[in-house]
Image (spheres, rainbow, N blue to C red):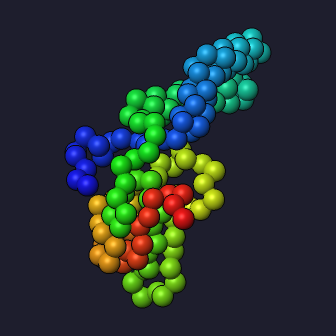
Amino acid sequence: MTETRADKDVTWLTQEAYDRLKAELDHLSGPGRIEIAQKIEAAREEGDLRENGGYHAAKEEQGKIEGRILQLQGILENARVGEAPRTEGLVGPGMTVTVTFEGDDEEVTFLLASREEVGAPIDVYSPNSPLGSAINGKKVGEKATYTLPNGRSMTVEILDATPYGAA
């Protein structure tokens, strides 16, 4: 499977995850905005805004809500509901991947999927993370090197890649 450039921004979501995120967006952009506006107005009525902790806290909360609304809109605009195209032995979104880190014999197994896919019984790594980007499109038996946040490089070997939920 060759992933096109446009597919790199796609977020694959289950129907449940899509519905949950859509409900959160609907709440935040409707009742959530109304609630925070009421908090701000109530805090304004308390007087001097320069020394009004409640006002500043409400404005900060408003900023967080607006940021989350933008984040959710971006996710949902680029979302595809259903199963990502998957090929046994090829790492990609929706695959359960087992790797070993160079210099360590311990195997690590995780689901390569959107971070919004909460509830998976195993750890979820984003395809956009440094590790996810490095292994995406690789085959079982291949090695991939990626850069850690501290600037050092890490190499992993891909031991297994199977569709999530496959026995």
Residue displayed at 50% across by 32% down: 72
Judge whether residue 152 can be spotted in this image. Answer: no
Residue displayed at 45% across by 36% down: 81
**Quadrant of the image occupied by residue 138:** bottom left
Give 55 or 29, whichever is nearer the viewer: 29
Q: Is residue 61 above or below residue 10?
A: above
Residue 3 in the figure: left or right of residue 163: left
Image location of residue 38, percent across then percent down: 71, 14
Residue 14 in the figure: left or right of residue 32: left
Image location of residue 93, percent across then percent down: 40, 53
**Quadrant of the image occupied by residue 154:** bottom left
**Quadrant of the image occupied by residue 165:** bottom right
Q: Quarter holding the N terminus?
A: bottom left
Q: Is residue 94 above or below residue 150?
A: above
Q: Is residue 117 above or below residue 80?
A: below
Image location of residue 26, percent across then percent down: 59, 21
Residue displayed at 25% across by 40% down: 6
Q: Quarter holding the C terminus?
A: bottom right
Residue displayed at 60% across by 33% down: 20
Judge whether residue 31 can be spotted in this image. Answer: yes
Image location of residue 39, percent across then percent down: 72, 19
